[in-house]
Image: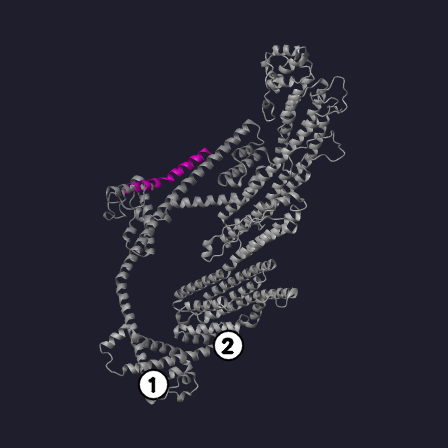
Amino acid sequence: MEKIKDAGRKGRVSLSKSEKISKQRAEEDGKDDKEGKKTVKFGDSPNQPLSDYDPLEVIPEEYRKHGVDTEPMLHYIRERSEDEDLERLLEAAQRDVRLHQARIKAAAANDTSLLGEYDFSKDTQFIARQERRRIRMEDVKSLTSEANKIICELDEDKKNLTHTERTQVKLARWQRALELYVYCPSSLSMDLLGLLEKLLDGTSEEEELSEVLSQAYHMCSALVDSTQQAVRDATDDAAMAEDAYMIRLEAHRMFANNALRRSDEIQSQFRTNGRAALQIGHQLEFAELKRAQCESAAILIRHWWTMEQLAESEDISGEELKVNEEVRGIIPPQSCRMDPLFTVPERSLEASKALKQLRAVVKSRGNAATAAAAASGGWSDPNSGRRFDLTAKLIRRTSKALEQRLLNRFAQVYSAGGSYDFSEKPRSGSINWVHLRELAQALMMFDSGRNLHQTYVDMVITSRFPELFSVKKKEKVRSTSNNPSAGGGEDSDEEMDFDMDATRSELSSLFHRVSDVCTAEFELIAHVFGRTGGNEEMTLTVARALLQRVISDQNNGLQSRISDLLQSIDRRGDFDAGAKKLDTFVVIHEKAAGLFHLLRDAAEKMIIHSHTVNSKDAISDYESTLKSVTALKQFLTSQEIALSSGHRKGYLNLELRLLHHNCCATLQDIGCVLDRPKARSQDLSLADKGILEEYRAPILPINSRYLMTCDILLGPLKSSVLRQPLIFATDSLARARLMFGDGKKGGDATARVITSIFNQMCNFYGPAYLYPIVQALGEKLNIAAPHNPPQLPFDEIDAAPELGVPAHFWVALEYIHTNAKSFDRELWAENRPGSGRVWEILHTTGGHSCMAQARKYRIQFFAELESRGEAAIHRALQTLSEHIRWILVSGGESMFATGGNRFFSGATNGPYAIPTGSSLETPNSPAVKSLTFCLRSQFVNIQAALTPTSLSAFWSALSMRLYDIFVPRLIQHYTITQVGAVILSRDVEALRSVSMLAGTNHAHWDNLREAVTLYMTPPGALKSMLVGPEGDVNSGKGLFKRVGRYQSLVFMSRRSDFRAKTNQGPRKATWVVELLDQLGVPDPTDTQINMGMFAAERKN
């Protein structure tokens, strides 16, 4: 196998030799170019010119030096370098291919006779290579087809053969598998080691194994030799193919260069001769133009003379020429005095053109050129001016009569009606649009068809839109609107409602009628006016005049009808009429958008209809029509904007007004009293410009006195009241989307409207609605506790006292929190595609500035609501703290901790100074038992009202306040006996248990629980409790470590045996002095106690 790889490497090396030589030759050529030397081209000998020797007699030196690695040296192709025939160049290339191979053979054999005798068909080496290649391909094909059979035979065992025969069969099969592995590796699923394992399978004796491996070695050697021969053959074939390719490539290069040179010559000839031909063509066109002008001038002069003779004969005879009668055909043709050109209807177009030229002559009398000709004596006849005036008068009379005849005929054909069929062979009953086009072409010669346009538009309006001229019905609506009291009472209102709905339905059908008629008329305009006079802009002029009359007519247009409808609604003046007007706005806008969309589609079709006839100037006609249609679409867009822009401004102000009214009316309907709004300054600059200022809803907050006296839960915070403004707002958003468009179509206009609605709702829900309620909830709480001590303990069968904060306070906060979330979910609805709410509308319209502004309104609303809610909750915390003090201090100190009443009012040692031997009737003191009962009842309401985070913060703060009330009272005023210490320990556990209902910061109760053990420990064991069993103050153990040195000593000073009575008064007990001396610490109670060291927030 190593031999096979070596042979492959040698083949690759031999294949790359020609590439290296070519690269080296290219580098030498580039070096010569840089040095300014003459470059030796491909195939040229660097030592001797090609023409100095016969190629069939001399072997070049390059072939003797390099042999098969020599680059081909061309001879026959160079001889035909100027030939432009590709076939002959390829024949020469084939001869150079043969010559190249002959030179290689001759150089190898040093025999020049081979230069002329060499032939591929007689080359034994070439033939042998081809034969070996054929045999090898057949073997590979056989191996591929028998791959499965070869693999299966490796595992077969011939039991009916001798051992020697089985070995020979196995070796033969293994040889086929080895060949399959070498030639077709993809067909074999095992590697070379697997093949060796198959060969040695079943061979156990050493001699047999040696024999098998020896034969396998010979097989591999033979296969390596065969493969090496195949690599050499492939190398030689590739070298020959490369040389042949390079020679043929040179032939194609020469052919391309010759073709390029020839094309350059042709181009230069064209530039030289074509310029002269172009000049000749221009001169011929100019001469033809002059000839046509002369013929036209001759015809014009003849027509002028004819008209001049008629005018002069009319003046001489004194009998007026009946121009109208003759032109309109009332007088028979044989009795007419005028030229038949003007009386025959079939020649109307020619007559129109002639009259247009004659009118141009008449009009030119007053210009500068004519005046100069008259001043220089061009008119020598003194009667020429009179004759000119007579002729001009007759020309004007004839033009007017002919135009009127054509207009009457156009009206007759159009009034005849019929279906609009514009095919080449229209069906019977179709309108004669071809005749209309001929008449239009003739009428365009009269004032650019102005009268034609007006006549056509009037015919379309009167025949296609009779409902626009229903004057009686319109006057009835106006009279009813101007006299709303006519008829009186509810009957007139119901009748007006019925008329309003009918009018809206009629307006909707009118929109559909306009769409259908204009679509059909656009098609007629494209065929009749589209090619009139070759001016495609005429379609734009006619279509624009029709649309302007239908839409913008001051008396009978769509805008006028819509304005009448809106005015009839406005005259009622109530809010129900405003709601109907809003619906009418939306209907009108929706129908108008659909109308103009259909009209733009109809305008697009005019491009196709205008080019049904082929012409030489098809491209220019198409561009002209495209410009006209584009201008018409722009006109439609401007009409749509004009129709809807004014309505949009009125709609927005009305929408905001009604939204504000409905929201405020919801509160007033349940009896809420609203404060008067603050006066706002108006923008006078907009009023001076005549611009309607955008409506800004006033803020009408709920009256604070009303909130202090009413039941908030049954009033402003009812679920129906909380929900109704959101329903109004969502309806407004839906109408705004219909009115201003959705997505990218709406753009900034939609974004601004949605932002205005959202801002108004934030102002209503905040300053006008929820803010006053939250503030009133806080102000309703009475922080001060009652003056009289409570009667403890409370009866747990009854409802727990509210501790100054009633349950409806927390329920109200829960309602407000739920409503705020509903406001955000139902109106803002962030990241909820398909909801049609504020966030989605602003996101789809792409209004980034409006989105930022709306986010600002939203953040301000929730930040202010949260701030006011925190203020109310903080007031509730203060109220609870004062009532906790009231129960613990006032109520707890008014009786013993065991529940017995005090017999002596002078006892001031607190509820835990219980004498030794007293019975423990209850596990807790009455004050603590009652307080925990009240706090647990409050916790249920607070937990329902606050979020988990807020609940944790609030209850942690309440726990600290409870600690700060209980501990200072304990260390300043109470004395604890051993019996009282048991009750105190139970009270601390109870308070700690209720404090840990929520929140996480309760370590201060753990410290207090450790400190309480000081009151239940004998004096002899206090040292080990304070500093640990070692008795070292600095050991970092005991209560000094957990609670603090200062705090532990102060807590210890409240023991009942800390001071003893002596003749000199109370003194420290002996064990106290000894303990302090042993610890080496001073007594902190000798000075004023620092109460800040016992705060719950302090970290030890």
Closer to viewer: mark 2 or mark 1 = 1
Residue 712 visible from this viewpoint: no
Q: Going by the image, does 134 lie left or right of 584?
A: left
Residue 776 position in % (x across, y down): 62, 41
Q: Provide the secondary structure element on which disc 2 rests.
A: helix
Q: Provide the secondary structure element on which disc 1 rests.
A: helix
| Magenta residues, dominant SS class | helix
Residue 251 position in % (x across, y down): 32, 51
Residue 310's tag is: 1
Q: Amino acid at mark 2?
A: Ser
Furthest-left residue in view?
A: 376
Identify the mark nearer the N-term, 2 or 1: 1
Residue holding disc 2: 415
Q: Going by the image, does 72 lie left or right of 593?
A: left
Residues rendered magenta in the picture: 1-29
Residue 976 position in % (x across, y down): 69, 19
Q: In front: 288, or 240? A: 288
Which quadrant does the C terminus fall into? Answer: top right
Q: In front: 634, or 345? A: 634
Q: In front: 131, or 1003? A: 1003
